[in-house]
Image (tube, rainbow, N blue to C red):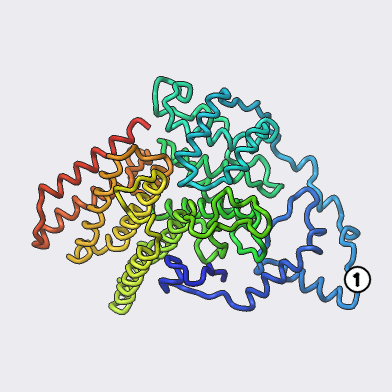
Amino acid sequence: MVRTSRGSDLGSPESISILAEETTPSEAQDDDDIHELSEPLKQLRFSQSSERYAASSSRLMLIKSGIETHRVGESSPNHNVFKRPVFWDIQPWQITYEPQLRPLIFPPQDLLDHLLDLWFTKTHPYFPIFHWPTFERSVISGLHYHNRDFGETLLAVCAISSRHSDDPRTFTHDSLLSAGFMWMRQVNPVPFSFTEAPSLAQVQKLILYIMFMYTTSMPYPSLVLTALGIRLLQDVGAHRKKNSPPTASRELWKRAFWILNYIDLSFSVNIGRPRSMTSDDYDVEFPIECDDEFWEQPDELAFKQPPGKLCQLTYWIHMLKLVSILESVQRAMSVRRLALSHRTGPDALQRRQQTVLGIDKALNDWLESIPVQLKWDPQCQDTVLFHQSTMLSIMYFFLRMETFRNDLATPSSLEICVNAAHSCVLIMEAHCKRDYLSLGPQMLVGVLTEYFWVQNSFNSQGTISNSGIVLLIGMWRAKRLGMGLNIELEMADVVKCMLYLERFEKR
């Protein structure tokens, strides 16, 4: 069983000792064997298919055994001699769908420049899916006119950035809610053919499509497409650790993996459905903490952040560590696990309490580990750091509510949840006074929300809505438990939650 291996990184499931499981030496050896086997197996793949990833548990290990047995004392055979084209090649009649693609319609150049600038300032610092210098060069060179997948990725960027723009060319039907749809409607998130391994641009546009659609009244496709995206990433082995020097391509695949893993967990937490992938299934490292401008340096300096300079991606790494803790929360507090613990008696309940304490300790350790620049400071003058610290703090308090909300009948858990909810309101109130929430925070905080099924619509109310609900429950429970609360102050924060949500109605 493959487990994440991030050493003693704070916030990883291993550091919490929840459901931990080590990778055995034999599994590691099998992984090495797969890489060793790759060259002879390249000749055994379907001729029209790109190279795909195969795990150590696959039937390739049986083939490996056969090849090793065969080649002892002999030179490697020419496998093409044994391949029969009728069975190995994709035949013309097997191509079931040939799409008639319409030309892509891009924004006028001035609007395109405007939307790209919005992405770089409003989204890229908080949603690091691209290596921006490379992306920008590709646009300048006109790659979107020649490569359809990249062209659709660019349109998805324009669609998301449109939600920041007041330019009337970004929306239709005289409604700001339509912002970006004219660009996103041209994006096809699903590959037309699965005979080829997915490209990076295909996965990137899929992720952007998911992020755009889940905030609309049509979020259902996002759930299904997230599972598809996970499979596409697994198809190229993006979920596995690579024992080789970093490259731009590999770092971009890692960025795509961790973003989609984040989304997958978010949906699972929000609606209580099983995940498409758990931490048992991957061991890929976090993205390298190195700003985009230091990727393209001489070999000895490439992918190395200058000493003393805070990396913009450091925020994202700490967010991912929180997400790792959230997975432990989600697994420990799932309905099925809770039901099982109640059936198996007090010992199981005691173990669950120990799990909660372990998660609480991991959260406290995480809080102590983050750089001082990323700690919440309402007076922070750096706009990017201000937004980043806002998201990290909101996420932290969200996790505290998630950890203890199943025990709201006890005064201690109720107090922790209510205090966390008040902290969320305080942070968002200070944030509103500074600036309208950037799309990056809006997206990432919005993913981790409570969802409500209302008249067949899937409506995201936001983490701040979750805080308001906790405050209301806190007032009702406190009365029953005989706890003293200032009802007027509690209701004042509930009203602040409602007023804050109004800010999102237009977009």
Three-letter code, disc 1? Ser
Image point (8%, 62%), residue name: 482
Badge count:
1
Q: Is residue 95 left or right of residue 356?
A: right
Q: Is residue 61 left or right of residue 428?
A: right
Task: Name the image quarter holding residue 201.
Answer: top right
Image point (24%, 38%), residue name: 499
Task: Name the image quarter holding residue 150.
Answer: top right
Q: Position of residue 114 (x, y in %)?
A: 51, 29
Task: Name the image quarter holding residue 274.
Answer: bottom left
Tell me if residue 54 comes above or below residue 491 in the rendering: below
| Near-viewer residue (350 or 201) | 201
Image point (59%, 53%), residue name: 231
| Near-viewer residue (411 or 125) | 125
Q: Split into 4 quadrants, where in the image is the C terminus? A: top left
Q: Position of residue 333 (x, y in %)?
A: 35, 64
Q: Position of residue 119 (x, y in %)?
A: 49, 37
Tell me if residue 282 comes above or below residue 91 in the rendering: below
Q: Is residue 338 left or right of residue 416?
A: right
Tell me if residue 433 comes above or below residue 243 in the rendering: above
- Label 1: how many Cα within 10 Å (few below 14, some 14–19, many 20+): few
Pointer 1: what residue?
75
Tell me if residue 222 comes above or below residue 248 in the rendering: above
Q: Split into 4 quadrants, where in the image is the N terminus? A: bottom right
Kindly state the secondary structure of the residue where label 1 is placed: loop
Q: Position of residue 6 (x, y in %)?
A: 52, 68
